[in-house]
Image (cartoon, grey):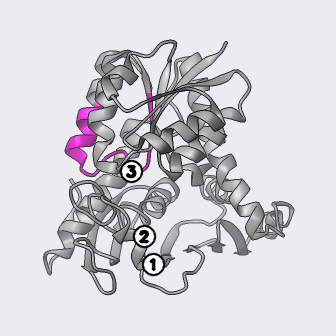
Amino acid sequence: MTFHIGLIGGGNITETHARAARAIPGVKISAIHGTNAEKIARLCREHGGTPYQDFDAFLKHRPMDLVIIGSPSGLHAPQGIAAARQGLHVLTEKPIEITTARADALIDAAKKSRVQLGVIFQDRMKPHIRQLKTWLDQGLLGRPLIVDARVKWYRPPEYYSNSRWRGTFALDGGGALINQGVHTVDLLLWLLGDVVRVQARTGTLLHKIEAEDTAAAILEFASGALGILYATTAAYPGYPRRVEISGTGGNVVLEHDRITAANLRDTSAAAEPAALDENQSASTAAVTDFRGHQAVLEDFLQAIQQNRAPACDGPEGRRSIALVEAIYRAARTPDRVAMV
């Protein structure tokens, strides 16, 4: 079976989507939509497909079985809903949308149209992160007690000034938390389960943007575990993401998406990460990120064929936005905010 894919966006992430699609046998890029004619023309020359600036005309292009959305976050719902109504399956970049209300509208549209809806959280596909998930599911860390998650990244001023949407409430939904930090928010929920209460503060400490470039939150999980989350784009020169989880059965450190320390009471399990890509270089990390998108797309195509939910479907992708919304609400009040 050949899958014909339409790409929406035309930016850097669409280039990644194109590379991921072309790496999969039986997949063909059918059309690419974007507002920058020069960019989408180049993408079509390099990866195939018909360029479109008119969105309605793009959606009517055939053959086309699904779309991958790589446009600004605040456009995911309207574009995804329009695609679903045309009978097209929808795979969207993170976050699913910028509010739960808009996410719910997209989820409902996909359900009514009986098409698949997936969200790209490619970190879930990385070997060391999947190993950590397995250990947690097997109970090797015992009862989780505390998690420390740090996203201390840096973005230069032009990252925002050269963009019409980054760091805006209308199209980005916020700043460092909803854009850069949302991957880690998703991982915390995937690894440790629901959060029931949060306390938080946000600030625009460095960049000239309307949203936050720094956020800090205290999380209380349904399991009773406590967590601390930092997300910033103001930490020059930028550092690898670090997640440390302590449980009654031991402690694990994840840095740059690799398990760098595993002190578990079960010593046989603690030795396993050595076999997992231990000497990953910066260049390999870039390839792994591309392969993560490829793995997400492969899973999504299998979900279409097998009529099952993809690895991260609409309701699953909604969870991270619900928590981001709660953190933003909590940042505006001195009191804790209960999840709804």
Mark toward the viewer: 3 or 1: 1
Residue 323 appearing in the image: yes
Residue drawn at the location 41% of the way across and 74% of the way down: 158
What's the amino acid at mark 3? Pro
Q: CA distance from mark 1 to mark 2?
A: 6 Å
Residue drawn at the location 35% of the way across and 50% of the way down: 72
Q: CA distance from mark 3 to mark 1?
A: 22 Å
Q: Which residue is mark 2?
A: 159
Left or right, 267 with reference to 137: right
Under circle 2, the secondary element is: helix
Nearer to us in this view, 45 or 59: 45
Residue 226 appearing in the image: no
**x%, y% of residue 245?**
56, 72
What's the amino acid at mark 2? Tyr
The stretch of residues the image draws in magenta is 90-107
| Label at residue 156 | 1
Q: Which residue is mark 3?
A: 95
**x%, y% of residue 337?**
19, 67
**x%, y% of residue 70?**
44, 44
Q: Quadrant of the N terminus?
A: top right
Q: Residues within 10 Å of mark 1 (few under 14, many from 20)?
A: few
